[in-house]
Image (cartoon, coloured by chain):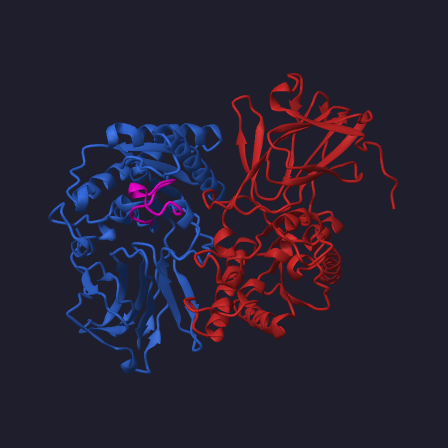
Chain colours: A blue, B red
Amino acid sequence: MNLIKSGFILSAMLIAHSSISAELKQLPTHVGGRVLESTTATGEKAYEYSWPAIYFETAFKGDSLTLRFEDDQNNFQLIVNDGAPTAINKPGKKDYVVAALTQGTHRVRLEKITETQESTGKFLGFYSDDKPAALPKRKRQIEFIGDSYTVGYGNISPSRECDDQQLFNNTNSQLAFGPLVAKHFNADYHINASSGFGIVRNYSGIKPEKSLIGLYPFTLHNNQYIYANNWQPQVIVIGLGTNDFSTELKDGERWKTRDELRTDYIGKYAEFVKSLHRKNPKAQFVLMASDRMDGEIANQLTEVVSYVKAAGVKKIDSIIFTDLDYQGCHWHPSAKDDAKLAATLTEYLKSKKVW
Amino acid sequence: MNLIKSGFILSAMLIAHSSISAELKQLPTHVGGRVLESTTATGEKAYEYSWPAIYFETAFKGDSLTLRFEDDQNNFQLIVNDGAPTAINKPGKKDYVVAALTQGTHRVRLEKITETQESTGKFLGFYSDDKPAALPKRKRQIEFIGDSYTVGYGNISPSRECDDQQLFNNTNSQLAFGPLVAKHFNADYHINASSGFGIVRNYSGIKPEKSLIGLYPFTLHNNQYIYANNWQPQVIVIGLGTNDFSTELKDGERWKTRDELRTDYIGKYAEFVKSLHRKNPKAQFVLMASDRMDGEIANQLTEVVSYVKAAGVKKIDSIIFTDLDYQGCHWHPSAKDDAKLAATLTEYLKSKKVW
């Protein structure tokens, strides 16, 4: 265990945008996750986001640091030099001035920890009157695609019973298994997950015109910007199926029988993996499912893996996870479960010698 | 003008699926456009499609040819050895047996000519008891992205007034400017267009949750299969804007003023082109617009091109087209206009020495 380095945040305050000093300049930023980048007339970059667990990093030499926000919906945590995280909750259209930083070279990381599904927020960047420092580039990339389990929905809740506000306050996507695994390997990560969605069917059959596959191609949740870039992760972990199968089919849904639903799920999931494989032909795929619903999800997943293997995708395995405590909101995996899932995945990736 | 070669279809008939001869084998098929490919237990391929102007090609040596359909919604034309097209209208779940073919090596091409927006159809392949022949690979690829103009909506209509049936019967997407240009250069083509859609706004503000950008990432119009493959066209031609701007804003739409709509269009169109450029960094982009609406569409397009150029996309131009007769259904470009547009584009591509 390292000692906590200098750079621990002693004090900070949120101030209105207009009062930012003209001497401050935007620091170069490394972005983790899907963002819509825009550039102002004066050359500053802004980053709009919807997906969970987005993060921003910079480094500089000195003691001046201001973060500029335009987000009244999300909670964040700020980490300086591997110190303890500082909460920045729903900052709104404000600047967050970090005071009493020691002089020195600082690595800074801002992490979004909450989930919003209908709104977007903007991070307007790190500012300083000091000089930027080098930020080491990561050689490893991993992507997680999933539902509430991958989001970390209610994972830090003291109780399974949660209202909307309790759910929001007790979700920390950075403590979900995805970021834990990524951080173990010092990998960049994307968490392309959204609670309630499935491969063909969403929780309790809601929003039948939507699915995670329908959201997946887009930079934001509004489906108006296509995400196309050179992101090529070495590992893609998918966990989708809980919402497809966790509730009974109702009248009016498009599958008449459970068997029809299963066949549709298997076919569309297999096509989804094949499309990801075409874009990432070298990636190792891991398909995860719980043992819940008497193994129904796990059984369908086994079929998906067979189909995809038969279609020529060789680097693919499934992990069926058992023995979780589901102490999170509404019987979701707890932070303890997340640590367990992360350990399982980490062991698997080590055994595969992916990195 | 070439003389019509042997292989002209003298007679043909549609028969029920079950009566196909067991000796017939599926011929290798080249597919043009986006299709969802599936494979039966016995190894035959089937192709499901939604987008316009899809085509299928094969070649064989002999005189036996049967086409297998599962589509009661679309009209097709069959072309053998550059002969005159033969119509195959709404074949349903039938086999189309081509009789009285001369012995010899035949190149065969099936083209979808109609537009359907809510349904899909399936082509189950070419069958023969003769041997497959080589089909030369094309080195050129071109993609067209657009709205009804690119679809060829009502382009062969004798009148501007059309009911739904007349519109359907008088649309030939293969005579729209896209396929004409592609065929001039012997290029493979994708026509990723859908009538009524725009960049941010659809015709008369309908279906506000959808847009061509929202449809674009998917293999079929149902948004359940992501299209990801190695298609990398050398040219991408986009024509979108007529539906965004051809009608007045109504109460309840998400833009309060025409200026807001224009700004939104410019921003999202620029991002769309940038995302296409990231996937196809070497492609030449051509953005087309008509001079209608007192130049409003053309003016916004000029802004889009400036934005995209400023973002580092160098191979991009706009073509503003004028003097069309709009004699197609509901004042759409006629087949004559399509030929004119094709000539303009062909000249442009020659001048750019793309091929």
Most distant residue in the top direction: B22
Q: Main secondary structure of the magenta part?
A: loop
Task: Please state the horizontal and vertical placement of residue B239, each as a whole percent of the image.
Answer: 61, 60
Nearer-the-camera pick, B259 or B203: B203
Task: Please state the horizontal and vertical placement of residue B106, each as a whole percent of the image.
Answer: 77, 31
Task: Please state the horizontal and vertical placement of residue A16, each as a whole percent of the image.
Answer: 25, 78
Asked if residue A208 is among those painted magenta in the image, a careful observer would answer yes
The residue at the point 27 percent across, 28 percent down is A295
Asked if residue A209 is among those painted magenta in the image, a careful observer would answer yes
Magenta region: A193-210
Q: Is residue B168 left or right of residue B183?
A: left
The residue at the point 34 percent across, 55 percent down is A51
Nearer-the-camera pick, B24 or A310: B24
Q: Is residue A334 visible?
A: no
Nearer-the-camera pick, A23 or A146: A146
The residue at the point 46 percent across, 74 percent down is B257
Nearer-the-camera pick, B299 or A240: B299
Task: Please state the horizontal and vertical placement of residue A13, each as a whole percent of the image.
Answer: 19, 74
The residue at the point 26 percent across, 44 percent down is A149
Q: Is residue B129 visible?
A: yes
Q: Is residue B228 left or right of residue A252?
A: right
Q: Is residue A173 left or right of residue B127?
A: left
Vertical placement of B40 versus A107: above or below? above
Q: Is residue A254 left or right of residue B73?
A: left
Placement of the C terminus of chain A among the 4 image quadrants: top left
Task: Count every numbered label the image shows and give the total.
Answer: 0
